[in-house]
């Protein structure tokens, strides 16, 4: 499982010009699922995200987490995070999970986030063509990968 986490001051997702998810301050998560992702990946990723201290405290140090700043989460499925582009100019998405598996893992991930975070999260619409808008705060952008837990 791969996640691009962006600390945002606001973010939204639209499908066919209709807003399906919106947050103010918090995390926009672009989530890529692989075929071999499991509940263990879901749990690790959710715990990591919910405990990250990447908001500034009164001294300007990244020392606060989402709960400390009353933040929100917007999670958007993003199969293109598993693109392979070594050969040619057209990426291959062979590593991305089949939709049946990806939907299940993405839903488990969102449920786990809500449980670990302690409140509902917003999401995009799985498999839809989405317009994602954000204001990156900082900017702060992190790449997390359950296969490379550094």
Image (cartoon, helix red, strand yellow):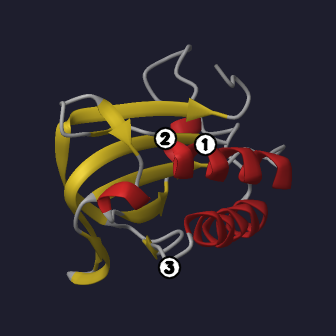
How far from the left and from the top, in percent, is residue 5?
42, 43
Secondary structure under tag 2 reads: loop
Q: Which residue is mark 1?
A: 48
Against 7, residue 91 (above or below) is above
Q: Give the CA distance from mark 2 to mark 3.
A: 18 Å
The total of numbered circles placed on residues is 3
Q: Is residue 17 above or below residue 105?
A: below
Q: Residues within 10 Å of mark 3 (few under 14, many from 20)?
A: some
In the image, is residue 136 above or below residue 62? below
> Residue 28 location in percent, x, y?
36, 54
Residue 94, x across and y down, in percent: 69, 38
Rendering coords of residue 51 (x, y %): 54, 46
Q: CA distance from mark 3 to mark 1?
A: 17 Å
| Mark closest to the chain's N terminus, 2 or 3 | 2
Q: CA distance from mark 2 to mark 1?
A: 6 Å
In the rendered image, the quadrant that contains the N terminus is top right
Dot 1 falls on a residue whose secondary structure is helix
Q: Residue at x 19, y 44 (%)?
A: 136
Task: Using the rendered image of the protein, determine whether residue 91 is visible from the camera's viewpoint.
Answer: no
Q: Earlier in the sequence, mark 3 or mark 1?
A: 1
Question: Residue at horizontal 55%, vertical 14%?
Answer: 86
Classify residue 81 as left or right of residue 9.
right
**Tag 2 near tag 1, CB within 8 Å:** yes
Q: Residues within 10 Å of mark 1 (few under 14, many from 20)?
A: few
The residue lying toward the viewer, choosing from 14 and 122, is 122
Provide the residue designation for mark 2. Answer: 52
Label annotation for residue 120: 3
Horizontally, is 14 left or right of 125 in the view? Answer: left
């Amino acid at each position: 499982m791969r996640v691009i986490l962006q600390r945002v001051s606001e973010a939204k997702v639209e499908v066919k010009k209709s807003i399906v998810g919106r947050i103010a301050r918090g995390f926009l998560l672009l989530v890529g699922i692989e075929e071999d992702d499991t509940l263990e990946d879901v749990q690790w990723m959710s715990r990591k995200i919910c405990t990250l201290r990447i908001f500034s405290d009164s001294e300007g140090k990244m020392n606060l987490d989402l709960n400390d700043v009353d933040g929100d989460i917007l999670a958007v499925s993003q199969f293109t995070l598993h693109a392979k582009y070594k050969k040619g100019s057209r990426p291959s998405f062979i590593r991305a999970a089949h939709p049946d598996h990806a939907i299940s893992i993405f839903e488990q991930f969102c449920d786990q986030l809500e449980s670990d975070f302690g409140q509902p999260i917003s999401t995009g619409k799985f498999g839809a063509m989405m317009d994602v808008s954000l204001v990156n705060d900082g900017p702060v952008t992190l790449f997390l990968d359950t296969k490379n837990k550094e």
